[in-house]
Image: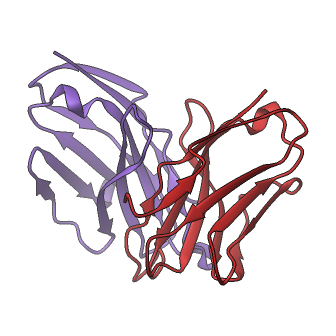
Chain colours: A purple, B red
Amino acid sequence: AQKVTQAQTEISVVEKEDVTLDCVYETRDTTYYLFWYKQPPSGELVFLIRRNSFDEQNEISGRYSWNFQKSTSSFNFTITASQVVDSAVYFCALSGTQGGSEKLVFGKGTKLTVNP
Amino acid sequence: NAGVMQNPRHLVRRRGQEARLRCSPMKGHSHVYWYRQLPEEGLKFMVYLQKENIIDESGMPKERFSAEFPKEGPSILRIQQVVRGDSAAYFCASSHFGQGIGGTEAFFGQGTRLTVV
């Protein structure tokens, strides 16, 4: 079965601090995709990144960076120099091909609060 | 992701009524997914449809819930005889080739928040 664990339920930081959100996944698929989504207080889901299992290169996009380590089944997300606007719930998700389905399996989310 | 349109944004129903949630995918997308988010929870997959076909409904409750994606028009998630436990945010996502192998990221709508009173 596929599973995504986000062990940190809530994190609170002060503006300009760096913060890392952890994501650990389980899957029997050899080929799969990992995602991060942001859900701000307004409630919509904002796509942040999609990474396939064959690409272990770390990725940086502005203040955001992602560390994919297949050996530890982790796909962690770091925000550098956090800002108040980063306050949101962040979801890690996994998509595989078990049974031919293309559904996303989500973690329970990490609520990040950035205080001024 | 603003291209996936869900309506209504908020829906209030009394216990026993029917709820109809609509999702218009992004232009050119033929794959639609419905997810449910209970309070303080992550999203849970409900159903995956392509035009006129249900591909995977493994996450749908066995009773009262149904979904369709007709050849023309939006996808509809229908909940009959709603109960308080159905109160949740329901998200629709669409993609071009699907979210899996060879697929692209799925774009989510803004969700419909259903409240059953």
Pick the front one: B9 or B60: B9
Q: Position of residue B14 (x, y in %)?
A: 83, 32
Pick the front one: B54 or B109: B109
Look at the image and tell me in which quarter the N terminus of chain B lies. Answer: bottom left
Residue at the (39%, 83%) spot, across then down: B102
Residue at the (37%, 61%) spot, across then down: A34
Residue at the (49%, 72%) spot, across then down: A29
Residue at the (36%, 49%) spot, across then down: A37
Horizontally, residue A62 falls left or right of residue B97, namely: left
Q: Quadrant of residue B68?
A: bottom right
Q: Position of residue B59 (x, y in %)?
A: 71, 58
Pick the front one: B38 or B113: B113
Q: Is residue B65 above or below residue B42?
A: below
Q: How many marks?
A: 0
Q: Position of residue A6 (x, y in %)?
A: 43, 39
Horizontally, residue B117 falls left or right of residue B45, namely: right
Is any atom of residue A73 visible in this view? no
Q: Is residue B109 above or below residue B24?
A: above
Look at the image and tell me in which quarter the C terminus of chain B lies. Answer: top right
Is any atom of residue B73 visible in this view? yes
Q: Position of residue A95 (x, y in %)?
A: 47, 66
